[in-house]
Image: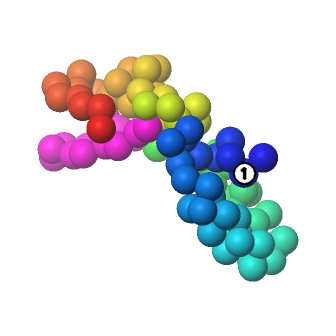
Amino acid sequence: MARTWFVPESHDEHISLVVEEARKASLDFHRNVVNEFGDFDLRPRLGEIKVPTLIVVGDDDSVTPVEGGVQSTAAEPLVDSASL
């Protein structure tokens, strides 16, 4: 299950380390994280940004995809984009 949280190129030892650290936290901690960040979405406020800003999303991120996400909610089209 934990592998689905990571990109395919992630190393098993890194995944194991994250899972090991996550297991140290209480159930209440995990419940609070899900409750607090589950609906966290600042896309409606992107138009308020008035200075050059770097917005980073992952190519393979199903939660914050580039298409239909940042590009479509910015007040003005984003001029530059790159894939790392």
> x%, y% of residue 68?
46, 20
Q: Is residue 48 visible?
A: no
The residue where tag 1 is placed is 2
- 44 relative to 10 in the view: left or right: left
- 32 relative to 80 in the view: left or right: right
- 72 relative to 61 in the view: left or right: left
Label 1: which secondary element: helix
Range of the magenta residues?
Answer: 44-58
Is 30 rendered above or below residue 2? below
The quadrant in which residue 50 appears is top left
The quadrant in which residue 76 appears is top left
Q: Nearer the viewer, residue 43 or 66?
A: 66
The reply to whether the magenta stretch includes residue 68 is no
- Residue depicted at 67% across the width and 63% down the height: 16
Q: Residues within 10 Å of mark 1 (few under 14, many from 20)?
A: few
The reply to whether the magenta stretch includes residue 55 is yes
> x%, y% of residue 66?
42, 27
Judged by its main secondary structure, the magenta piece is loop
- 61 relative to 46 in the view: left or right: right
Is 16 rendered above or below residue 69? below
Query: Mark 1 belongs to which amino acid?
Result: Ala
